[in-house]
Amino acid sequence: MIDIPTADAPVDAPRGRVLLIEDEPNIATAIGFLLQREGWRVSTHSDGRTALDAVVRHAPDVIVLDVMLPGQSGFEVLGGLRAGQNGTRADLPVLMLTAKGQTKDRDRAEALGVSRFMTKPFSNRELIEAVRDLARTAPG
């Protein structure tokens, strides 16, 4: 788990919490940096098996979730989240990321209740806008 500070965040930044569940260190670092630069408080987690515990521990406003994770897939994590397992909030907005981008993956994610689905590679602006949009729709 890495907590990335927000000391240099823009004054008008949203200041919400993002939990990034991604096992590839370079991708996690890059996404974390992008979001931190926009004022988000970012925590990272890399294991699907313990991801729901991380959700409870970090109490994020938005989750950015990779499909391919060790231990459990992002689909399994999303299913557990939507079922409220481990005391998670089933209504948290989730942006799911995948390198595959196949229609069946998108359909599966939508059936499980994903808020938004994005295929790698994506533009920095696209990612930031997606997280911002999801934070606006986040419950209370």
Image (spheres, grey):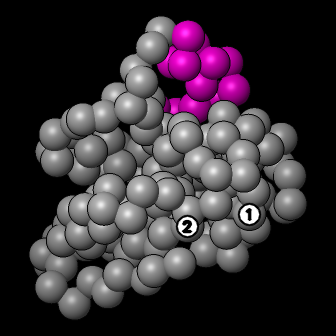
Q: Amino acid at mark 1?
A: Thr
Q: Position of residue 127 (x, y in %)?
A: 27, 45
User: In the rendered image, which residue does mark 2 sit on?
Assistant: 45
Tell me the quadrant of the picture where the C terminus can be found.
Answer: bottom right
Callout 1 secondary element? helix
Residue 105 sits inside the magenta stretch: yes
Residue nearest the observer in this picture, 26 or 131: 26
Residue 54 sits inside the magenta stretch: no
Please name the residue shown 83% across and 49% down the image. 84
Choose the circle earlier in sequence order: 2 or 1: 2
Residue nearest the observer in this picture, 120 or 19: 120
Q: Is residue 16 visible?
A: no
Q: Magenta segment range? A: 104-116
Horizontal side, residue 47 vs residue 21: left or right: right
Q: Which mark is residue 50?
A: 1
- Quarter of the image where one finds residue 15: bottom left
Please name the residue shown 50% across and 57% down the image. 23
- Quarter of the image where one finds residue 80: top right
Please name the residue shown 24% across and 35% down the image. 121
All told, the count of numbered labels is 2
Q: Amino acid at mark 2?
A: His
